[in-house]
Image (spheres, rainbow, N blue to C red):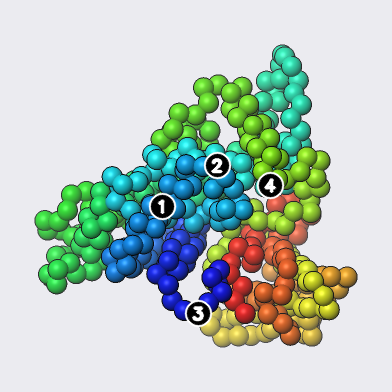
């Protein structure tokens, strides 16, 4: 989509596959210890396909290396204008020989830019952190430092876990040369050199002689590493897993975070004194990827699904519908025309329009749902236009009993995905 052409060019692979890999990484790092074997295997197979394409088009490795070097050598090449999608950078390391370019060559530049870009979202959640004025001494100063460190960590937690996941994957699945990676993948998931695959043990690892350290590729080992990532709760631990020496003291960390705010201002990622509530929400609560579901806790009673959108001209609709299922059987559909039923379990707001935008709100009383209902599926559809003509969206699912100021249960960032017309 970025190249606005249907003619294939090998460099398109470097545009598409990092997005796919990042989507899998978000899914896995957000699911945490409940991550499924299916998602894990999917990521490994996508990596294997990525390597196969590089083997087919060897110049892709040169192009990937050039992109990484360009990113590292000049700060201007790391800005949003030059690199709109920071998530497209790390997956490039997966297809380059470790001796040619590795995480150690990239980490300083990458982490610096990642922290600068995070300021907008940190301040959206905690606007007071944009204020850089400090209490000079004493206990009040210590409390101020602790607050900035704690709140910034809370706001950056999902991003930090995603980065830790990427680094873990690089360290465990991308050692040595690309040829060695291909061989390891084929030993586990396929046939190497047309030889018969040896029997698998209980962890899904070939039991006979194969390359060393294959247990690092096992789903069990993956689960243990994800538990470690989710246990990280301090900046020191985060930097240690990144392989860098973080600020020596809490005061130094406070200074670094304030420098990031200044950098964000200079790069015009945000403006001092701006209204952060107007920033389009992204990456809060549980991140849902395309096609993923959210399993609610047993104590949840009242759910609110909210969808708002904006458009440039005319009147455009991004309709929200709720489909109730009994296993695979569709039982009822609620939309802007069919807004409620006799039970009162589901209430659809219908079209609530304003100049340049609209909202749909669907409220569900789970206790009033028929016992046979096993799932609620929310669907968005554009009535008479394409998604490309919808400027912004805000999609969330919340626990109504916890009030409007509580973070939603889950969100979906439509703008983070390609809108195919």
- Give the mark toward the camera: 2 or 4: 2
Among the 4 quarters of the image, the one containing residue 359:
bottom right
Q: Are marks 2 and 4 in contact (CB under 8 Å)?
A: no
Nearest to N terminus: mark 3 or mark 1: 3
* Residue matched to label 4: 269
* Residue matched to label 1: 66
Nearest to N terminus: mark 4 or mark 3: 3
Mark 2 element type:
helix
Inter-mark Cα distance, 2 to 1 = 15 Å
* Residue matched to label 3: 6
Tell me: 244 left or right of 293. left
- Residue 411 in the image: state x and y as whole percent: 65, 60
Q: Are marks 4 and 3 in contact (CB under 8 Å)?
A: no
Q: Are marks 1 and 4 in contact (CB under 8 Å)?
A: no
- Residue 348 in the image: state x and y as whole percent: 78, 76
Viewer-side residue, 75 vs 240 = 75
Inter-mark Cα distance, 1 to 4 = 26 Å
- Residue 315 in the image: state x and y as whole percent: 83, 78
Nearest to N terminus: mark 3 or mark 2: 3
- Give the mark toward the camera: 4 or 3: 3
Near mark 4 (Cα within 10 A), the count class, few <14, some 14-19 or many ≥20, is some
């Amino acid at each position: 989509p970025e190249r606005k052409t249907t003619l294939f060019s090998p460099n398109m692979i470097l545009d598409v596959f990092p997005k796919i890999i990042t989507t899998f990484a978000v899914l896995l790092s957000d699911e945490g210890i409940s991550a499924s074997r299916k998602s894990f295997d999917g990521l490994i197979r996508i990596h294997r396909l990525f390597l196969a394409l590089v083997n087919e088009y060897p110049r892709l490795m040169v192009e990937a290396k050039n992109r990484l070097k360009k990113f590292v050598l000049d700060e201007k090449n790391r800005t949003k204008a030059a690199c709109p999608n920071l998530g497209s950078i790390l997956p490039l390391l997966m297809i380059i020989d470790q001796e040619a370019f590795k995480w150690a060559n990239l980490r300083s530049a990458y982490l610096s830019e990642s922290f600068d870009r995070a300021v907008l979202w940190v301040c959206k959640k905690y606007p007071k952190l944009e204020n850089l004025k400090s209490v000079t001494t004493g206990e009040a100063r210590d409390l101020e430092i602790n607050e900035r460190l704690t709140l910034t960590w809370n706001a950056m937690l999902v991003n930090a876990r995603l980065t830790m996941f990427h680094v873990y994957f690089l360290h465990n699945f991308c050692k040595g040369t690309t040829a060695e990676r291909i061989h390891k993948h084929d030993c586990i998931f396929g046939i190497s050199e047309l030889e018969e695959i040896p029997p698998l043990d209980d962890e899904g690892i070939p039991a006979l002689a194969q390359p060393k350290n294959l247990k690092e590729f096992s789903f069990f080992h993956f689960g243990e590493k994800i538990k470690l990532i989710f246990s990280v709760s301090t900046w020191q631990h985060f930097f240690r897993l990144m392989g860098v020496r973080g600020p020596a003291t809490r005061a130094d960390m406070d200074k670094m975070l304030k420098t990031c705010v200044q950098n964000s201002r200079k790069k015009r990622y945000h403006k001092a004194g701006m209204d952060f509530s107007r920033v389009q929400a992204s990456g809060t609560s549980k991140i849902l990827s395309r096609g993923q579901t959210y399993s609610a806790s047993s104590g949840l009673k009242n759910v609110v699904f909210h969808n708002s959108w904006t458009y440039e001209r005319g009147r455009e609709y991004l309709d929200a519908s709720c489909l109730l299922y009994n296993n695979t059987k569709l039982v009822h559909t609620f939309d802007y025309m069919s807004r409620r039923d006799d039970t009162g379990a589901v209430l659809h707001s219908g079209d609530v329009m304003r100049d340049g935008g609209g909202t749909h709100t669907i409220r569900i009383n789970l206790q009033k749902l028929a016992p046979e209902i096993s799932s609620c599926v929310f669907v968005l559809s554009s009535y008479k236009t394409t998604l490309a003509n919808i400027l912004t969206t805000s999609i969330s699912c919340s626990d109504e009993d916890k009030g409007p100021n509580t973070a939603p249960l889950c969100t979906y960032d439509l703008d983070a995905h390609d809108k195919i017309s």
